[in-house]
Amino acid sequence: MSKVFQYPILKKMKTRIYQALTIVLLVGCSEDGPTLSESFFKIYDDSNIDLSYHPIDVVETVDGFIILSGTELTNTDFQGVQLIKVDEEGNFLVETTLDSYVAPVGNVYMLDSITYFFSMNPTTLQAVLIGVNPQLEVTLETTIGGANYPLATSLTSSNELLLLSYDPLNFTSEISLIGLDGSLSSSASYSIGAGSDVEEKVINHLLQVGQPLPFFCGEQSAGNYYFNGFFNFSFSLVFTDFSANPSGVVQGQSTNAGIRAALPLSGNDFAIAGYQFDENFQLSSSSLDPTGISSSVDLFPGDMAELKPYTPSKIISYTTGSEDYTVFAAETKARQIVLYFYNAATGEVAGIKEIGFLNPYTFASIKATKDNTLIILGTTFAAGRFERIVLTKLSGSEIGDILK
Amino acid sequence: MTRKDFLLGNKILFAGIFCLISIGVSGQKKPPKNPLESFLDTQFWLGLRMGVNYAQAFPETSFEGISPINYSADDPTKSYDDFSLSGAHMGLEMNFYHQGFSASFQPAFKRSRYSYSSGFVWEGAQVNSRFETNYKAEQRLDLIELPLMIKGDIIRKGKIRPFLMIGAFYSLITSVQKDVDVSQIDYSSGTPLESSNGTVTIGVKDAFQNFYGIAGGAGVNLDYWNIRTVFEVAYQRALSSATKPGVLQNELASLGDVNDEVRLRDISVSLSFVFPFRFIDQQFKAL
């Protein structure tokens, strides 16, 4: 080989050839992508042209994910309860429809391998706590006495379920603390306002007629809770410790302005997604007064013009490495799902991720998983017309790329 | 690379090298050559190489973005068109020839194309409740290809010298684009209404990766005037995937399209015009 380089031209080229080969070897070393269980994008198609799917929430189980969805029923206008099981790579495994119940409510939680959620008895309108195992077999069906029209739920730090419901007889919003066996620990009822009746709005919300209302509830700290619902003639964020009267309220403006999602950060600081008629806003951190009366109008910093009017929104916290982020999810006017990553320490936007292209996409839910990924649930319109469930899982490395 | 591929690659390489050595050994028994032939026994050649190629995308593992609820998961599988689209390549041919053997380095810029299609059908309870949509995707890969071939002359005398060749290549991805042509047929009016949803062009380089493989072929050297014209036909077989499994691209995934683990196979026809190096050093006199 050394004789080869005795030719004058090649002698000069010898160093360059070695350099080129080195570069080729370096460039050739490509990084492996995430595994199929770390990252996937699945559209769950049904060949039935007449069916639409309305996903509500997703929960990570021991061997995959369970999606809670609403589906059309022939015997009622309420949404039926459908459960879909997919494996760790997002592949469809099995689905079941619970014929006896309607109007499934998010969020969905898994404790000790049992997935819990609320739905409604279509005859009595009472809330029913349902538990299913990873094989989608029902292990718990308990009617929650006195809780009608279930609207939102949340898991507390003591592993109890917080349930927001509406009482059409007493015209009150009800907040209840319920054990995993369906036992009622605490509850409180707050008037929606004398002479006010919002049952039609509640029913339309459950029937998914018009714009859905942003019902939600949660725990600020042990013994202190909040819910977003009807109170005192407006759709408001209400703070409560289950006393006879709310401890504080951030008033909305009828159903035209208010809070769409809230995440307690520390103390009285919350991450807030709100709306002002057809305008939307996000606050990565805002101090609320849980013991006084304030107005959501005063929180409005300006319109995020890319967001769709009355977009569904959710906020979660996400930690990677030593950095904490607050993730807002919503829908854009371009019919994509959009994720905003805010640095929890600085409040600045650290990255934006849009999901969806060509066909319209809607947003339903977002959660962080045990392996530090994000799963995003929504729908797309296959071929531009058939609404089908979409489940996306973003790996830690993909999220890292977004945050760069 | 799987063990099966590794063994297959080794077998082909050893078989090829054995053939080439056999050709060389048989050549050594021949009587001494005239000075010109002796001069040509060791020579460098450098020149341009160009040609056309036809690719086949071989899916090692299939992946689908659509996960069916009420029909078989095998139904929406992509259907690949083999060796149907022409590509082109152009580059250098650097050839070191010694007593019947050549070591040929052929760096080239190459465009490789393949296509696949998939379709979906939705039906309802009504007679005319039927809708079809079809995707036709064309994949264009721009590569810097680095093949190293060993050529063995079958005939070592005269101006027409056929040869066999075998070697390996490494391909660097520089750019990848995908054109997705969407069409649909709506039967709801009673008469099939066919329409086009247009063509979407997407850059998909992030979903692809460099790959390598083995190659073999045959050709002929034509020694007229002071240049050598090389005509060759080669077959390439990638031993690693050109796609990155698990890499999701929003635009693709949103259409329900996820790349399979694809290994490219390729048939190419090339023409090279190469010049002797020692001629430049004036150690060779023109005929």
Image (cartoon, coloured by chain):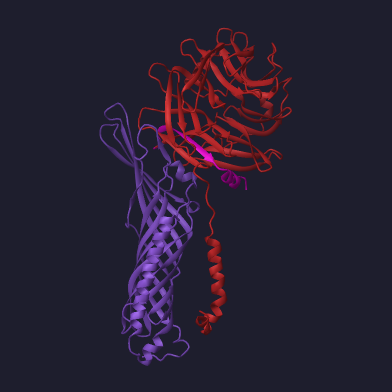
Task: Give x and y (percent) for residue A290.
Answer: 72, 22
Q: Quadrant of residue A286?
A: top right
Chain letter matching colour red = A
Q: Is residue A75 above or below residue B180?
A: above
Q: Quadrant of residue A174?
A: top right
Front residue of B275 and A322: A322
Q: Is residue A106 above or below residue B182?
A: above
Image quarter where the C terminus of chain B lies is: bottom left
Task: Give x and y (percent) for residue A376.
Answer: 53, 35
Chain letter matching colour purple = B
Assess whether residue A398 is covered by the magenta stretch: yes
Assess whether residue A168 is covered by the magenta stretch: no
Task: Give x and y (percent) for residue B184.
Answer: 33, 40
Q: Residue at x 37, y 54 (%)?
A: B57
Image quarter where the N terminus of chain B lies is: bottom left
Q: From where the camera sits, is residue A339 visible?
A: yes
Q: Residue at x 44, y 37 (%)?
A: A91
Task: Give x and y (percent) for residue A206.
Answer: 50, 19
Q: Residue at x 37, y 76 (%)?
A: B21
Q: Residue at x 36, y 31 (%)?
A: B70
From the viewer's perspective, is A115 left or right of B150? right
From the viewer's perspective, is B65 left or right of B221? right
The residue range painted magenta reads A383-404
Q: Quadrant of residue B252?
A: top left
